[in-house]
């Protein structure tokens, strides 16, 4: 654009110079034809006044032409500036989209690796039953929850004739008593449950801290929730309301993780506790 403007100025200068030269030439021819003997020198000298007027007129015309050209150049510059501004805005928008796409890809890579780690850690959990059989993964966690339920939440008693039944352990009728029961139980399985819950917590925290990148966070948390069995959700509930789940509980509530929990696996006396937690995130028994 700058070179084009310079060429136009150069061309205009040549045009004005050519007009001046042509005017002088024609004026000289006129003088020679009118004063062929140069005898009337006074009239010849006065003729320079006409030449001066002619030059002044041409200079004025040149000034007008220059002003018009400058106006056109300014208009072109403004148009070019507007175009450059629009182009920069479009480039900025494109870069923003590209950066968000890149950040989303980085998030997904990290999330799915975390999810894979969680699955691997769950598969390493194993329980050896009384019949010397080893159970891994989800089935092992079901047995762990069964142990917690029948040893801590309920009390075993005999009805005679070899019949064994369970009734609710009233020690778990308040938050402190329930927390003590879970604490004693957790010590037994901490080597297995500790990494398992920490991996789950890291996945949820990753999603929560990526809300500026991820538009639909629940899509990813639902992927994690879909990996859990109903019994795992029951154990997650008690872990969340215990001292061990202080950081986990807000995320479990925020991402509605207990939506599909099987309440039949929860003692009847804890149903209101579960409902309060699901509806408000509070850990409290209803009166």
Image (spheres, rainbow, N blue to C red):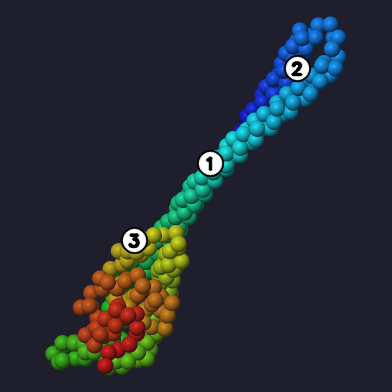
- Say above or below: 45 vs 173: above
- Say above or below: 65 vs 25: below
Frontmost residue, 194 versus 35: 35
Looking at the image, tell me whether mark 3 or mark 2 is earlier in sequence order.
2
Residue situated furthest top in the rendering = 37
**Marks 3,2: beta carbons within 8 A:** no
Looking at the image, tell me whether mark 1 or mark 3 is earlier in sequence order.
1
Is residue 48 left or right of 123 when viewed as pictured? right
- Say above or below: 187 vs 55: below
Q: Name the residue under label 1.
A: 83
- Label total for image: 3
**Spatial separation of the CA atoms under disc 1 and disc 3:** 41 Å
Q: Residue 99's spot in the image, x, y percent?
A: 50, 52
Name the disc covering residue 219, or none. 3
Name the disc covering residue 158, or none. none
Q: Residue 126's spot in the image, x, y percent?
A: 35, 69
Tell me the crowding category of disc 3: few under 14, some 14 to 19, or many 20 or more residues within 10 angstroms, Cα based. few
Q: Which residue is at 69% across, 20% downward? A: 19
Is residue 19 left or right of 276 when viewed as pictured? right
**Spatial separation of the CA atoms under disc 3 and disc 2:** 86 Å
Regarding residue 238, the answer to whether it shows in the image is: no
């Amino acid at each position: 654009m700058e070179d084009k403007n310079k060429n136009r100025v150069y061309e205009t200068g040549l045009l004005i110079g050519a007009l001046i030269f042509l005017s002088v030439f024609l004026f000289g021819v006129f003088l020679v034809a009118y004063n062929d003997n140069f005898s009337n020198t006074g009239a010849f000298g006065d003729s320079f006044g006409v030449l001066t007027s002619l030059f002044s007129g041409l200079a004025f015309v040149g000034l007008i032409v220059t002003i018009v050209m400058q106006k056109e150049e300014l208009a072109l510059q403004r148009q070019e500036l507007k175009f450059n501004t629009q182009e920069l805005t479009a480039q900025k928008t494109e870069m923003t989209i590209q950066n968000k796409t890149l950040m989303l890809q980085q998030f997904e890579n990290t999330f799915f690796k975390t999810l894979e780690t969680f699955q691997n850690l769950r598969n390493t959990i194993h329980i050896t039953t009384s019949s010397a059989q080893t159970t891994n993964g989800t089935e092992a966690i079901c047995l762990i929850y069964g142990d917690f339920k029948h040893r801590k939440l309920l009390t075993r008693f005999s009805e005679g004739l070899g019949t064994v039944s369970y009734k609710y352990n009233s020690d778990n009728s308040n938050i402190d008593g329930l927390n003590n029961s879970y604490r004693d139980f957790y010590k037994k399985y901490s080597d297995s449950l500790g990494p398992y819950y920490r991996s789950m917590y890291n996945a949820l925290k990753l999603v929560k801290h990526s809300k500026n990148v991820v538009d639909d966070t629940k899509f990813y948390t639902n992927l994690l929730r879909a990996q859990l069995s109903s019994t795992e959700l029951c154990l997650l509930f008690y872990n969340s309301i215990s001292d061990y789940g202080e950081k986990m509980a807000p995320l479990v509530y925020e991402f509605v993780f207990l939506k599909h929990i099987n309440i039949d696996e929860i003692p009847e006396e804890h149903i209101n506790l579960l409902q309060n937690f699901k509806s408000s995130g509070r850990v409290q028994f209803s009166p």
